[in-house]
Amino acid sequence: MSYRNSQLTWLLRESLGGGSKEVLSEETLLALVRAGCDMSLRDTDGKTGRDIAQAKGHTALLELSLIH
């Protein structure tokens, strides 16, 4: 995994509720996925970006992650 990709994944998870508050807008999150953010990587709790997106109801991110 590249350093760039790990940073994108961290931002995605923090913004979807992995952190204490949303960091980025949904539009920005969609751009991160288009840029190659790997939503299949797991955090320390074993959750993937897809898991968090599904739990938070971000269907656009889930659909896009299946394409990219």
Image (cartoon, grey):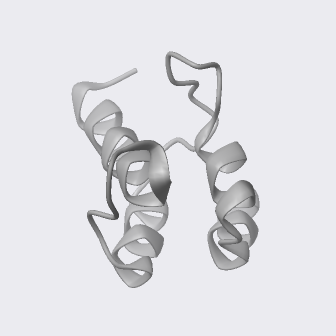
Which of the 4 image quarters holds residue 21?
A: bottom left
Q: Nearer the viewer, residue 58 or 6?
A: 58
Asked whether, in this view, residue 19 is left or right of residue 41, the answer is left
Above or below — where is 56 with respect to 58? Answer: above
Q: Residue at x 36, y 48 (%)?
A: 14
Of residue 47 and residue 19, the one placed in the foreground of this image is 19
Q: Say if 20 sits above or below 41 in the image.
A: below
Residue 9 visible to the viewer: yes
Q: Is residue 65 visible?
A: no
Percent position (x, y) of residue 53?
Answer: 64, 58
Observer-nearest of 45 and 66: 45
> Residue at horizontal 29%, vertical 69%?
24
In percent of width and height, residue 61 lies at 62, 69
The quadrant where residue 29 appears: bottom left
Residue ID at (71%, 44%): 51
Q: Please state if 15 lies on the left or on the right of 59 as rendered.
A: left
